[in-house]
Image: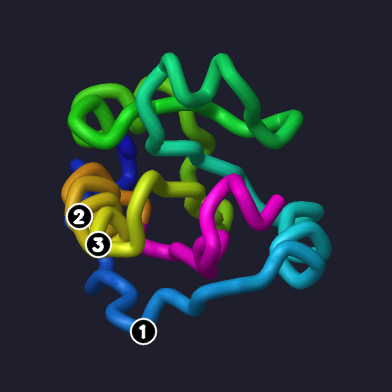
Amino acid sequence: MADDNQKGPSPPDQKRIEPLDAPVFERSMLSCILVDTRSPYSFASGHIPGSYNIWLDGLAKFAGWILEYGKDTLLVTERKEDVETARRYLVRVGFDSISGYLCEGIEDW
């Protein structure tokens, strides 16, 4: 974030966030950060190994402390409607490269 604070951020990536089925999502995980925006209770009842749980309302506050800048991000959300909210929160703190989301949610996994 230090470079962005001194030089200013680059324009955010506005490409469409692609829905990914479980096999494609799993292949994409190898080079991405996985962020699960479901509630901590939902996450505790079952999640994808290696994922970070930052609930949707906490995303704008905690993503910068936890996630690594400069890597693509994949999302797991409660609802499809949450994808755009998660994008908005992440872009505000410098995470604008969101590669996709698990299209049928954790149930698809």
User: Which residue sits at x=36%, y=84%?
Assistant: 15
**Quick one: 59 or 24, which is closer to the camera?**
24
Q: Amino acid at mark 2?
A: Thr
Q: Nearer the viewer, mark 3 or mark 2?
A: 3
Q: Is residue 102 highlighted in magenta?
A: yes
Q: Nearer the viewer, mark 1 or mark 2?
A: 2
- Does dot 1 land on a helix, a strand or a loop? loop
* Residue 92 shows in the view: yes
In the rendered image, which residue does mark 2 sit on? 85
Report the number of numbered marks.
3
User: Which residue sits at x=64%, y=26%?
Assistant: 46
Q: Amino acid at mark 1?
A: Lys
The image quadrant of residue 11 is bottom left
Q: Residues within 10 Å of mark 2 (few under 14, many from 20)?
A: few
Disc with the residue nearer the chain's start (3 vs 1): 1
- Magenta-highlighted stretch: main secondary structure? loop
In the rendered image, which residue does mark 3 sit on? 81
In the rendered image, which residue does mark 1 sit on? 15
Query: Pointers 3 and 2 in contact (CB under 8 A)?
Result: yes
The range drawn in magenta is: 96-109
Gap in Å between the C-alphas at discs 1 and 2? 15 Å
